[in-house]
Amino acid sequence: MSFARTAPKKYQIVETRLQEKLANGTTRCHLCLWRCGLKHGMRGFCQAIVNRHGTLFNLSYGILSAIDVGPIEGKPVKHFLPGTQVMSVGSFGCNFRCGGCHNLEISWGVTALDELARGLSTAAYVTPEDLVAAAQRHDAQGIAFTYSEPAVWLEYVLDVSQVAHDAGLYTVYVSNSFVTEEALTLMAPYVDVLCSDIKSLDDDFYQQICGAARVEQVLGSIAGAQRRGIHVETRTNIIPGRNDDPDMLRAIAQWVHDYLGAESPWHITKFFPAYKLADLPSTPSEIMWRAHDMARAVGLKHVYVYDDKGCDCAQHNLPVEAYLDQDPAKVHELKKCAGSCCDDSGILLKKYEKYDSAGR
Ligand code: SF4
Ligand code: SF4
């Protein structure tokens, strides 16, 4: 499957690929399992998708919040081209609201997305071709979409991935896997690796961080990715008192074994206190090693414990422009959408309404 590239040369909102106009005047977004129904002027739960006159657009196409280059093992991915370097990139926007999220300004990016919507952003805009060229200049063999949730950035992920494949680079998608079957089908030819969270096997846990999420949906997406030929590795960030029940951790390992296979890698990472969970301790090593031993006992062959690593957050990175062969002043010039759907001389949305559950 191939598709026409839509990459504009300058920042512009881009029509999303998975949307459906409903008879009641709303348009439904099928990028992730929220499946938000939006009216003109409304933005989805993730804040990155906006309805303009009945058509859904991605606000953050090509907008980068962070770049870094490092070993693929750091994602963590251990069983796909080990020893290679990957350029990690992220934008703004997530479809979850985890209480222990570490990089809210980037991952949720609510302020940054507001600035984009109002034509006040100075964030970097990078075309897929320029990003792949930057990866090659920095001797990266792959590109990883991480830091924010790539499901809400799919149009850019697909365009970059196609250019990356044409240039011989692989692609990695680091996700919470709250994605639709339709999105998986679109990305399968272009995404080589999925590194997915399994945060818990408890529906209440997922409901607290995303009212719409159920364990079965997340697991279904992970298994669906592997069925479509994507190389899958999973990780669980163990949070003391929240998802450290030994029976549940054993059940996660059992699920990985039964549905992804005994050879499928499972990564166990450490929780570091942050945001609403700042009062919790970090994860004791014994808990992580106990989970490791249980996973080995159920038959998983590749279980990795990280005593020094949590989520794949953007921290201590060089400024984005350090990786781009461009004048920093130009990289951070004011971004006004080059489109004309607003009839508003460059300001994308004078007025917008945030997600309203009544409109779903
Ligand atoms: S949260 Fe965002 S990506 Fe998910 S369905 Fe809603 S608008 Fe689409
Ligand atoms: S931890 Fe990950 S999935 Fe959760 S809100 Fe942060 S970026 Fe989103």
Image: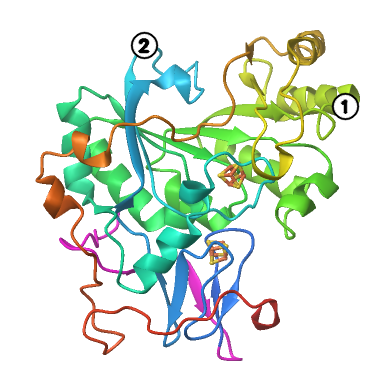
> Dot 2 surroundings within 10 Å: few (below 14), some, or many (20 or more)?
few
Q: Position of residue 279 (x, y in %)?
A: 76, 35
Question: On the image, numbered disc 2 is attached to which residue?
Answer: 83
Q: Position of residue 93 (x, y in %)?
A: 49, 55
Disc 2 and disc 1: Cα gap in Å? 34 Å
Q: Is 2 in the magenta?
A: yes
Left or right, 179 with reference to 69:
right
Q: Residue at x 81, y 8 (%)?
A: 297
Camera-nearest residue between 301 and 125: 125
- Compared with 261, 318 (above or below) is below
Q: Quadrant of the C terminus?
A: bottom right
For badge 2, the amino acid type reads Gly
Left or right, 145 with reference to 12:
right
- Compared with 264, 209 (above or below) is below
Of helix, strand and loop, which mostly describes the magenta segment?
A: loop
* Pair 2/1: label in front: 1
Q: Position of residue 231 (x, y in %)?
A: 50, 29
Left or right, 304 with reference to 9:
right
Taking the image as four quarters, which one is ligand 1 found in? Answer: bottom right
Camera-nearest residue between 173 and 204: 204
Question: In what element is the residue under mark 2?
Answer: loop
Res. 201 in view: yes
Question: In what element is the residue under mark 1?
Answer: loop
Question: On the image, numbered disc 1 is attached to which residue?
Answer: 245
Q: Residue at x 46, y 63 (%)?
A: 48
